[in-house]
Image: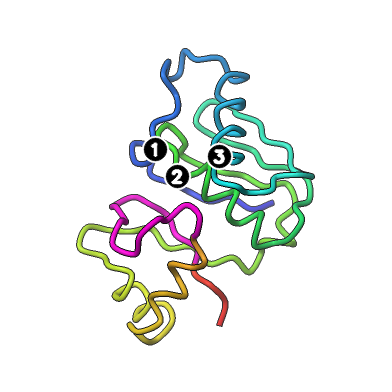
Amino acid sequence: MGVWSFVKDAGKKLFGGGAAEAAEVQEDRLKSEIRDLGLDASGLDIRVEGDKVKVGGTAISPEMKEKVILAVGNVAGVATVETSHDDDTASAVFHTVVKGDTLSAIAKKTLGSASRYMEIFEANKPMLKHPDKIYPGQVLRIPAG
């Protein structure tokens, strides 16, 4: 099992009713967000339990599963994402953005060269629309290599 932590108060606001909103409504909104981003969540089961999202099943690729984890985790109100099959995401590397971070700085720290920032940008599409549009608390995929 894999468990990833997110900043609960950061991210896109999808849930209108907070904790009082039904889990089924939250699940529908998360699935809609995944579809709107153009991600393929076929083979995955997404369940909300309080501030935890459980992503079960097998995705079409480890990369797609990592992107789904980020799409649901970077939503305000989500504190953790848990997967039931971590064998396909065991090598995933994520970075939580802190105040003052840039993709260049993250690339230098994680990939060894600031000039590799576009690799991080590409690895986080379609969630990222522009390399300068990151925010503290956001969690990003760091590509292998």
Label pair 1/3, CB-CB below 8 angstroms: no
Picture quarter containing residue 106? bottom left
Give the foreground label among 1 and 2: 1
Which three-letter amino acid code belongs to the residue tagged 1? Lys
Which three-letter amino acid code belongs to the residue tagged 3? Asp
Q: In the image shown, does 125 or 139 lie closer to the viewer?
A: 125
Say whether disc 1 or disc 2 marks the residue closer to the N-terminus: 1
* Image coordinates for residue 127, horizontal then vertical, percent: 47, 52
Q: Which residues are magenta?
A: 125-141
Give the number of the disc on residue 12. Answer: 1
Left or right: 31 in relation to 13: right
Residue at position x 54%, y 45% from top? Answer: 37
Give the foreground label among 1 and 3: 3
Main SS type for the magenta part?
Answer: loop
Give the number of the disc on residue 104. Answer: none
- Residue that label 2 marks: 74
Left or right: 50 in relation to 62: left
Picture quarter containing residue 109? bottom left
Say whether disc 1 or disc 3 marks the residue closer to the N-terminus: 1
| Residue 142 position (above or below residue 55) | below
* Image coordinates for residue 138, horizontal then vertical, percent: 37, 51
> Magenta stretch: residue 132 in it?
yes
Label pair 1/2, CB-CB below 8 angstroms: yes
Say whether disc 2 or disc 3 marks the residue closer to the N-terminus: 3
**Secondary structure of residue under mark 2:** loop
